[in-house]
Image: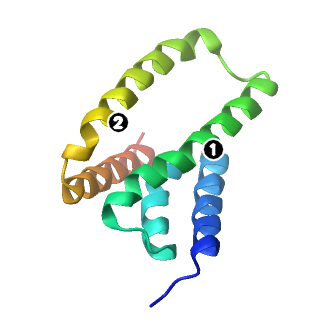
Amino acid sequence: MRRIPYLGYVLAGAGAGAVTGLFGAGGGMVLIPLLTLCTDLREEELFPASISVILPICVVSLGATALSGALPWREALPYLLGSAAGGLLAGKYGGKIPAVWLHRGLGILILWGGFRYLWP
């Protein structure tokens, strides 16, 4: 089945943006399944495409939160530094991890996060 390429990208990005906007996070967790469903991307293209979509979503969310005055810069800075280091390591070595393990890891994180929110 041939999918409509640009519409699929728009739908996947809109879904990830909506989840991030509503919940403050989680857009990346829905993006891989949406990209799989809505586009013809190959397995090895899904995660890099997801990252390229999440960056602008994060920048927009950061800007909106900062403009509203709700961003605790002092408390956020250590997370920013740690996430930058983690992102660099994942970008350098993530391609060496088989896609099936990345999918399983993402699934485990989604389940763990869901259980955490159900029973705080």
Q: What crowding class fits label 1: few (fewer than 14 Cα within 10 Å), some (14-19), or many (20 or more)?
A: many
**Amino acid type, residue under disc 2 in the picture:** Gly
Asked whether residue 108 appears in the rendered view, the answer is yes
- Per the image, label 2 sits on a secondary structure element best described as helix
Q: Is residue 66 above or below residue 40?
A: above
Mark closer to the observer (2, 1) = 2
Left or right, 8 with reference to 118:
right
Residue under the image location 43 percent in, 60 percent down: 32
Q: What crowding class fits label 2: few (fewer than 14 Cα within 10 Å), some (14-19), or many (20 or more)?
A: few
Asked whether residue 26 appears in the rendered view, the answer is no
Dot label at residue 38: none
Dot label at residue 91: 2
Choose top left, top right, bottom left or bottom right for residue 91.
Answer: top left
Color style of the picture: rainbow
Q: Is residue 60 above or below residue 28?
A: above
Of mark 2 and mark 1, the one earlier in the sequence is 1
Residue under the image location 57 percent in, 75 percent down: 5
Residue under the image location 30 percent in, 28 percent down: 89
Relative image position of residue 44 (x, y in whole percent): 32, 59
- Per the image, label 1 sits on a secondary structure element best described as helix
Relative image position of residue 52 (x, y in whole percent): 52, 47
